[in-house]
Amino acid sequence: MESTDRRIRSIVIVGGGTAGWMTAAALAQALQGSCRIELVESEQIGTIGVGEATIPPIKLFNQTLGIDENTFLAATRGTFKLGIEFVGWGRAGHRYFHPFGQIGAEFDKVPLHHYWLRERSRGDTSALEDHSLAWVAARDGRFTLPSTDRRQVLSTLDYAYQFDAGLYAAFLRRYAEARGVRRSEGRIVGTDLRADDGFIERVRLDGGATIDGDLFIDCSGFRGLLIEEALHTGYEDWRHWLPCDRAVAVACEHDDTFAPYTRSTAHAAGWQWRIPLQHRVGNGHVYCSAFTDEDTATRVLLDNLTGQPLGTPRPLRFTTGRRRRFWHRNCVAIGLSAGFLEPLESTSIHLIQTAITRLLALFPDRDFDAVTTAEFNRLTGVEYERIRDFLILHYHANTRDEPMWRHVATMEIPEPLAYKLAHFRGHGRLVAESLELFQNPNWLAVMVGQEVWPERHDPLADLRTGVDAASRLASLRQVIAEVAAAMPTQREYIDRHCRAQ
Ligand code: FAD
C-alpha cells in the first residue's frame, strides 16, 4: 500500500551563487533538519560575481536567520546604505536622492508633500529631500541606527547594506553547512524527467554521479538550467521597455568619502553605478547595445571612476524580463534563473529573498497541487511587473537629448505606470498598492526627482486652514539638520562596530 506521508523528503538546490546559498541557508533554518538539502555548484562555471547593493528588507532576512549585523558586515566588508543618488537622470546636470524610510514626518492628514508642493508654488525653494533624514545624513557621510520611538525623527530613517556578494555567499554557505546542508561540487550535464508527468527526477553530474530529489530549486543563473533548459517554461522579454542589455563592471580603489549610499550616474546610452564597500568601490556601466558599443561603454566607465581600477573591466550580458512560469511542476526558479531587472534600484537580491519567503509560505508536499503553484506564480509575476514599472519611470520621465533617452521618453509605457503618472500629474496623488515593493514614499522621491510636476496639490490642503504648514516644514528641516549633524560618520560607526579585520 502506498504511504500517506506526502512530505517533501529531499530538496536539490542547483547553483551556489547568492541565490543558491540564500535559499540553502533559509531552508536549513526553516526545515530544521527534517528534510535532506543538497546544493550542487560548479567552481569551473563560477558565479556572476556582481550584486552588491541591497534594499532595507534584507535586514529581515538576516534577522530571521539569527545573523548578527556587525558580524555580517565585518565578514562581507559591508557598508550601510541610506538610499541612491541619481545624477544626470531626468536631465543632464540634475541630481536627486531616493532615500530609504519616510520623507519627513507627517504632521497632518494631508500628506506632507502636498504642503511642500503648495509652498513651492508660492516661491519656497527648499528641496523635498531636505525633509529626508536619510538624504541629509547621507550627504554628509553620516550614519547611525534608526530609533524605534515613533515620536523621534530618527525613526523616519531606514537603511540597507552594500557588501561583497561573494563573501555573503561564503558566509551563508558556512551557515547552511553547519545546519546540515550538503554541498556537491560538479557540473550538471543532464536532467532526467519522469516519464508519466514530466517532473524532474534527478540531475546528472559530469563524473557520472546523480542526485535525486522531490523538490528542485533552480538557482543556476541566467541560463535556467532546470526551469528553461529542462522544462522549457519560456521567457517574457521586456527590452522594449528597459532596453539596456549589457554591463561592464570593475572595482576601484577606495577613496576617503566612504559614502553611505549608492550612486547612479546617467550616461549617453545607459548609467553607471558606484557602490562603496569597506575595502573597495564597486562600479559598473549598464548600457544599451543598440545605442553604444562595448569599447565606448568601457571607456566611459573608466573615465568616471573615483579611484584606480582594480583589475580589468568585465563584460556581462542580460535580457530584462521574467520567466513565464517561476514554479513549474517540482521546480522553483530563484535568482537570475527566474528573471532579470537591471540593478537600478538594487532589487535582485530582494527578489531572491521574497521568492524564498513565498516558497516557505506555500511550501508543497509531493502532490504539488496546481493552486499552490499558480499562487506562487501570480504573486511573483505581480512583484516583477510593479518593480519593472518603477524602473521604467526613471527612464521614461527624462528630457535628455541623446538618442536612447529620446527613445525611452517617447515609448509606450505599461498601463499601470501610465495610471500612476496620471494621478501624480493631476493632483500629486500616489497610488501604490499594498502588495507593491515600492511604496508611496519611493514613488514620490522618484517622481519629484525626475521632475514630474503635478498640476495641482491636494485641494484638501487649502481647506485645512488651521495647519501652519510653512512653519511645520521649516521646523522639520531644522530638526533633521540637527539630528543628522549629531550622528557619527559612517566611517566612525563602522570602525567602532563592524570593521573587517
Ligand atoms: P549566479 O551567481 O550566476 O550563480 C549560478 C550558480 O549556478 C553558480 O554557482 C554556478 O556555478 C551554478 N551553475 C550554473 N550552471 C551549472 C551547471 N551546469 N552545473 C553546476 N552548477 C551550475 N543584485 C542586487 O541585488 N544588487 C545589485 O547591485 C546588483 N547588481 C547587478 C549588476 C549586474 C550587471 C548584474 C548582471 C546583476 C546584478 N545583480 C544585483 C543581480 C545579482 O548579481 C544576482 O541576483 C545574484 O548574484 C544572484 O545570482 P544567482 O545566484 O541567481 O546566479
Image (spheres, grey):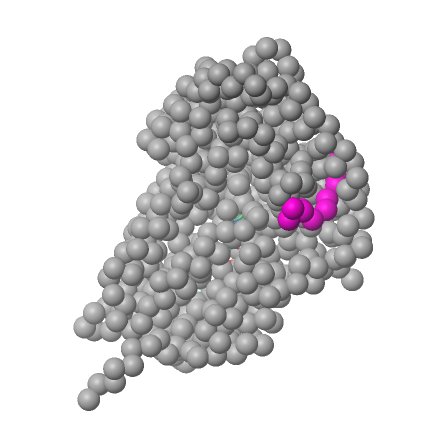
Residue sitting at 36 percent across and 45 percent down? 382
Q: Quadrant of residue 373?
A: bottom left
Q: Nearer the viewer, residue 279 or 225?
A: 279
Write the start and end of the magenta stretch as one range: 140-149
Q: Nearer the viewer, residue 250 or 104?
A: 104
Residue 425 position within the rendered picture, expressed as x and y whole percent measured from the top left: 43, 20
Quadrant that contains the C terminus: bottom right
Residue 295 position within the rendered picture, expressed as x and y whole percent measured from the top left: 57, 37
Residue sitting at 65 percent across and 46 percent down? 149
Quadrant that contains the N terminus: bottom left
Residue sitting at 45 percent across and 73 percent down? 31
Residue 443 position within the rendered picture, expressed as x and y whole percent measured from the top left: 49, 33
In the image, taking residue 255 as reference, residue 260 lies left or right, namely left
Instruction: Name the residue at the top extreme.
Output: 122
Instruction: Name the residue at the bottom extreme.
Output: 1
The reply to whether residue 473 is visible in this rendering is yes
Q: Quadrant of residue 88?
A: top right
In the image, taking residue 169 as reference, residue 424 lies left or right, namely left
Give the main secondary structure of the magenta stretch: loop
Q: Please say whether residue 409 is one of the residues in the magenta stretch.
A: no
Residue 284 position within the rendered picture, expressed as x and y whole percent measured from the top left: 60, 42
In this view, 121 is above or below 315? above
